[in-house]
Image (cartoon, rainbow, N blue to C red):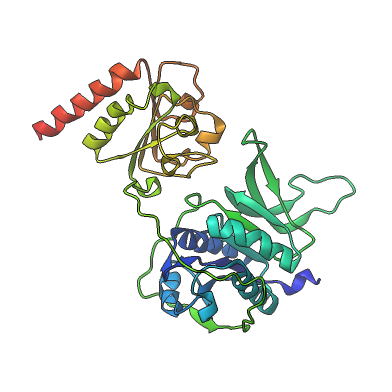
Amino acid sequence: MNIQDYKGVFVFAQQVDNVLGGIALELVGKGKDLAKDLGTEVTAVLVGSGVKGLADELAEYGADKVIVVDDPELKEYRTEPYTHALASVIGEFKPEIFLIGATAIGRDLGPRLSARIHTGLTADCTQLDIGDFPLNPVPGKEQLHNQLLMTRPAFGGNTIATIACPAFRPQMATVRPGVMQKAPREAGRKAEVIEFNPGFTPNDKYVEILEVVKAVSDVADIMDAKILVSGGRGVGSPENFKILEDLAEVLGATVSCSRAVVDAGWKPKDLQVGQTGKTVRPNVYFAIGISGAIQHVAGMEESDIIIAINKDETAPIFDVADYGIVGDLNKIVPALTESLKAEMAAK
């Protein structure tokens, strides 16, 4: 492998039912930042059937080029044809960096693809940078420049690891949804569109999809919420979440929770914030009865304003909170709700 032959930052633009996922646009935004540091371009790889029309949206969010792999075999996600499509793109265009969202699809696709093209994969990254590796000079060892530094929680979130892949290309990572930010949309911006089809020959690894059953849920997506009222084990019981729901109703907010609440069966996993849940960045995040374990903080520390309410003044959540209230949430939250109601009524 001649590493010098590999250029550019590529991202997998995941779509389902011909609708781009938010992670696709987040990766384009981050890819654009990385490409700027390397003096190169960001290319989105769009895989599916009848998906060429999505190229303009990717361009408006920052993609310089869009490679479209369009084939009836790619209508629904299946591991083998999608792996073949992306491996063929990488073989033909030789990107230096390839990013995939750590979604259900990405977690299946990323490892298969990295094995197929014989490179490493760093999973569930929360930060990506261009820099030197090793991070600090080591006597007798060459320090390589312009490496992709992939940072992720390790050992259950108790430490942070920064990983590089200096000997193989592309440098590959999966990235948690909600961690990176989309670039501002530039209406009318265009990208170079390249149509590429490596051809598909079904084999015994092409599973047959007999039926697609879509789950119907009335649970709001906490990743889209501007205000989150999040409860932890300290709320005390599933019935006691009613006081959080009352506060959320007044604020036009969404209720979320910590892992302990999900493990106790009080709330569904769709509402879980944290390393094993969802990463959120609302304008305001209420952490009520949440101790602030590093696994939870990893999922909400990028919120614009964090307000913590906890009876334990030494709780780690206060280290990341912008505003903290020490006291009994059963008294504080209802009082806050009534105060907000009165203020809104006065307006």
Quadrant placement of the N terminus: bottom right
Residue nearest the viewer, comparing 12 with 56:
12
- In the image, residue 274 sits, relative to residue 114, either above or below, namely above
Residue 187, percent from left and from top: 35, 71
In this rendering, position of residue 78 left or right of residue 170: left
Percent position of residue 91, x then y: 70, 76
Is 14 in front, or is 30? 14
Q: Which of 147 and 269 is in front in this view?
A: 269
Image quadrant where one finds the C terminus:
top left
Residue at the image point whose x is 29% and y is 19% from the top: 332
Find the residue positioned furthest to the left: 346
Q: Position of residue 157 (x, y in %)?
A: 61, 36
Image quarter for residue 269?
top left
Quarter of the rendering containing residue 12: bottom right
Rendered location of residue 188, percent (x, y): 36, 75
Report which quarter residue 82 is drawn in. bottom right
Q: Which residue is drawn at 53% across and 75% down?
A: 74
Residue 314 seen in this snapshot: yes
The answer to whether residue 40 shows anywhere in this view is no
Query: Which residue is drawn at the image coordinates 54% and 29% (left, top)?
Result: 293
| Side of 208 relative to 282 (left or right) | right
